[in-house]
Image: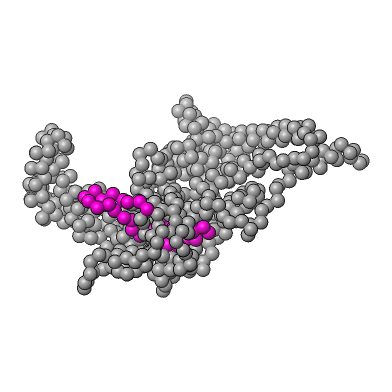
Amino acid sequence: MRAGPALSALAGLALMLTAPAPPHTWAAEGMSLQEILLRAKPATVLVVSEVSSEVVLNCGSGERKITPNPFRETGTGWFVDSNGWVVTNGHVVQPAHQPPMWLINEQAQRAVVAACVYEELTKQGVGPGQRPDLEDQLRRAAMARAYPSARVEIKPTIFILMANGFRLPAKVDKYSPPVSTQMGAGVMSGRDLALLSVEAAEMPAFKLAESKNIKIGDPIHILGFPGVVLTHELLNSAAKVEASATNGAISGFKQDVQNQPVIQTDAPAAWGNSGGPAVNAHGDIVGVLTFVSLAPGAEGSIVQGFNFIIPADAVKEFLRGTKVDLADKSPFNEKWFAGLRKFFSDDWKGALVDIKAADRLQPEFPDLRRLMTEAEDKVKNPPPRPFPWRQAEGAVVGLTMVAAVVLGVRRARANRRRISAADLLRASAGGTPPVLLDVREPVLYAASPYRVPGAVRVDPERLESELTARGIDRDRPVVTCCVSDERSSAQVARRLRALGYPGVRILKGGLGGWTQAGLPLESKPLGD
């Protein structure tokens, strides 16, 4: 049976309307600023140097052991090799790598004040700050009596935090001390660089550019974790571990006090940005932020517009002789960069495939989740394109209505067995709260230090035996939770229904949906 002319025209119109726009020629266009920064952010990490301690002291009633608040230094680092190699500033890791004597003394003083001063104030019914004269008197007496004989045992650690929430312990593989203004024998002065190793693979990573080719006026972008953002009381914890970006240009070429070349930039920076990557218009590293400029005087506030960068060529020289492979190709980068190129070339279906592949390699990066959501929306609701034939307006309206109905039905079917984080909280406050099962794959669960509060861990590979061991009633509602692609949750939910659990739903977005709703995570139990 042959189709009539009207039906053929309608079918042809439908094909034209649903066909994707031809992708742009990638090589013919430069990257937008948004694409440059999105390429760079996943490889940028927060570096934390922490020195905890135990202090044995005697306030006059016998020796006792005090654990003062740890000293913590934060800075920025970045993966230079996908096999777990991170570059940062030497001064960022120095407190934990070579703990200075002033830090040890400071820990002893904190312990003396906490044990000998504040406890005595409490005994006398006086709060800190209420009697400055008495507090000063007690402090002087405690420092004279307990401080000289205090014994300090320090426990330095270094770790990195990635934007997806993963915390990885790090070791210093190579170290060059900060630049020193002092001269003479025994004075340590170096390039202010450190190479850290973490147990990881297939990580995002940067490519080092040739800094000798850069010129004054070239655009530059600095990524990092400025303290003003990291300690901001109005931001949630997930937002704080996403790198911030500032933009500027190369404004000069200088030498430090040891006559080593540095690059001057007007891109803003603050404490916490130290060690951060400075990237060019291709998203490649041209240098590493090393020091800023301070105003004269006691306060010494940062003067913006006069910040300094270690050139990439100096970083390459520092890495010479290490196990870092500067020619390494990150599997994550290949998928993520391809997805970004397709996304900004309006090939949203292709972008979705590549970005999901990158998310499987390194899950839960906020930028990947946001871009996947946007790409899915553009695939379902493509932006309108000009259409030349007015006579087709009726057909366009009809097809749009049909598409809207179909999309609505599909969305309703897909969402019927999913539950949002907000709805889960409301259900948990009811008469029969659902059991929340954390069914992440073993590798992903072991790599993450966090979980949704109250979640019960069930290994998908031992589902039946763990359900029996935990005594989960078949009549009780059950919600499964994994990562943002919901793959493991969906698989376990189907198996649970087959085992006779009728009221099974999936937490929408997994851990990512929970944090995007502004809800906190909790640390997993030790040994879990």
Q: Residue at x 51, y 31 (%)?
A: 423
Q: In the image, what residue occupies the spot 79% across and 40% down?
A: 13
Is residue 483 shown to the viewer in this render?
yes
Question: Residue 359: x, y in percent?
Answer: 55, 51
The way the protein has been coloured in the rendering is: one colour
Observer-nearest of 320 and 37: 37
> Residue pushed farthest top?
431
Q: Is 246 above or below relative to 480?
A: below
Q: Nearer the viewer, residue 48 or 398?
A: 398
Is 298 a magenta residue? Answer: yes
Q: Is residue 226 left or right of residue 373?
A: left
Segment tinted magenta in the rendering:
276-305
Q: Is residue 116 magenta?
A: no
At 38% from the left and 60% from the top, the residue drawn is 264
- Name which residue lies at 7% across and 50% down: 145
Q: How many marks?
A: 0
**In this view of the protein, can residue 44 be seen by the observer?**
no
Residue 138, given in percent of the width and then of the height, sits at: 9, 43
For the N terminus, give its image quadrant. top right
Residue 198 at x, y percent in the picture:
41, 60
> Farthest right residue?
1
- Relative image position of residue 270 (x, y in whole percent): 35, 51
